[in-house]
Image (cartoon, rainbow, N blue to C red):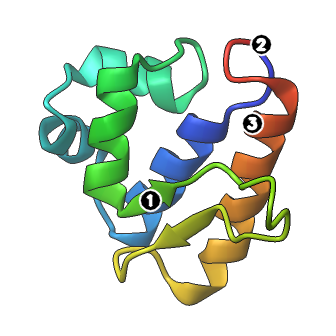
Amino acid sequence: MRGNTWGSLLGQYRIDNKLIKKEVAAKLDLSREYYSKLERGKVEPSGKVIHRICKVTGAVITLPSKKNKNKDICSICSLIPEDKKEILKELILKLLRNGINN
């Protein structure tokens, strides 16, 4: 497993919102044990779980178009502080460069 993009996003979301793992797991409708593995990068989320992560954290992922390679691939709702948007964008770019299944 390369990197820990989803775990990093969830950990940052949890810290920024002063939540405990159990609370974030409940928001995602996941067991506390599975959530913990997800945050530590021990498991890869399914598409369904990725959808829940995006819904809960406010992350929106769009693939760049061929016409506009500079298109912003990630925007975050107000749940994520402005100064964290660039970090998440870099994590998503890394995920796309390395391939989602790598």
Q: Tag 1 or tag 2, which sits nearer the N-term? A: 1
Q: Nearer the viewer, residue 17 or 45?
A: 45
Residue that mark 3 sits on: 95
Residue type at mark 3: give it: Leu
At mark 3, the secondary structure is helix
Residue that mark 1 sits on: 59
Cα distance between the residues tagged 3 and 1: 14 Å
Q: Nearer the viewer, residue 83 or 37?
A: 83
At mark 2, the secondary structure is loop
Q: What residue lies at 53% left-to-right and 16% top-to-bottom? A: 44
The reply to whether discs 3 and 1 touch (Cβ–Cβ < 8 Å) is no
Q: Position of residue 92 (x, y in %)?
A: 69, 48
At mark 1, the secondary structure is strand
Residue type at mark 2: give it: Asn
Q: Tag 3 or tag 2, which sits nearer the N-term? A: 3
Q: What residue lies at 35% left-to-right and 43% top-to-bottom? A: 53
Q: Is residue 97 above or below residue 8?
A: above
The reply to whether discs 2 and 3 touch (Cβ–Cβ < 8 Å) is no
* Callout 1 crowding tier (Cα within 10 Å): few <14, some 14–19, many ≥20: many
